[in-house]
Image (spheres, grey):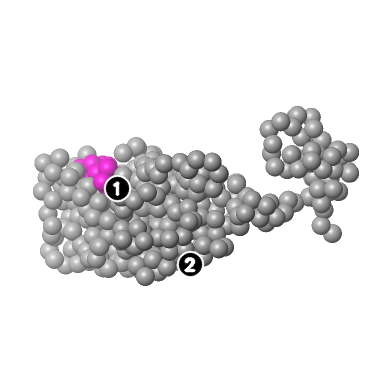
Amino acid sequence: MRVSLKDVAAHAGVSIKTVSNVVNNYQHVTPAMRERVQRSIDALGYRPNLAARHLRKGRTGIIALALPELGNPYFAELAAAVIDSAAAHDYIVLLDHTGGRREQEILVSQGFRARVIDGLILSPIELETEDLRDQTENVPLVLLGERDYDLPYDHIAIDNVAAARAAVRHLVRLGRREVAFIGARRGRSEPAQLRVRGWREELSAAGLPSDEGLVAATDGWGHADGAAAMARILESGRSPDAVFAYNDPMAIGAMRVLHERGLRVPEDVAVVGFDDVVEGRFGAVTLTSVSPDKEAIGRLAVESVLARLGGGEEPEPRRVWADYQLVERESTLGRAAPGRGVLG
């Protein structure tokens, strides 16, 4: 049998309004009264009807999160951060998979689910500025990632150029001089372009050439793509003493090929990834990686959506830079690596 506010009020010997104030966390309830009502809530097993609460405010209680790759560990961990943050505000998250395809990103951004969601968090890959400029649905939209659209939407990202420079700087300080980059995108990809740019800038700052023969472009960003890119560099006759990979799966794929070719990590070739996914922390050689603050990105995205649902004057669109750090592990420091984090 479902327990109602009336049942809790009767059990606690207070008014239904008082119970409602406690359930909705109103600040003017005294600590003693809050404790009294909470005891009755716990004793009866009362659970608030969140759907009814949202409907009273003209909302659905649902935020959509559209990601390009649900199988990518980074996006899986980011989704978990968004879901946890939304739950703290009594919202649930509807996941959507765009595959990084423009037509799907347009469909999502144009609000085809506008009637069932209160807001959209979108991580686009191929979406163009004109696609967003034509948006007609009045649903709060928050963008994630590094594509710069110069449009009035909240945008949350990390500084990819600075993060890439921190990764390459680490390798240079370890005495590495032939630093390869794997994961440059054959098609358009602003994150890949920015990370290659950071690679070039840091090598130039160190007085080292940014040898384009050490840049391997790929169609995808998975383990197999990293392995194939590493193999192509080695088969070209190049002998890098370090590799900076677009992401952790590619770095792990590259390390597998290095092992198969009899090259030791990090003694012969040091390797740095990007995204700091869980998988990289448990391999035979733990992976040094740029670690974006995924929890902060998820929290900021949810808070940005909710800020535009709060009523009153709508906040100005903002671009927010989330923090990151370089976490140094065995793939660059060897077996004695403590797994310490270093800010970029």
Residue lying at 13% horizontally and 44% vertically, measured from the top left = 204
Q: In this view, does 28 lie to the left or right of 238?
A: right
Q: Which one is in front, 1 or 134?
A: 134
Structural distance between the alpha carbons of marks 2 and 1: 31 Å
In reply to whether residue 171 is colored magenta, the answer given is yes
Judge whether 236 appears above or below 181 on screen: below
Magenta span dominant secondary structure: helix
268 vs 125, nearest the viewer: 125
Label 1 SS: helix
Q: What residue type is labelled 2?
A: Phe
**Mark 1 Cα within 10 Å, few/some/many (few <14, many 20+)?**
many
Residue 246 at least partly seen: no
* Disc on res. 160: 1
Q: What residue type is labelled 1?
A: Asn
Q: Residues within 10 Å of mark 2 (few under 14, many from 20)?
A: few
Looking at the image, which residue is at 31% across and 39% down? 344
Residue name at image x 79 percent, y 38 percent:
18
Query: Picture coordinates of residue 77 (x, y %)?
Result: 47, 54
Q: In which quarter of the image is residue 118?
A: bottom right
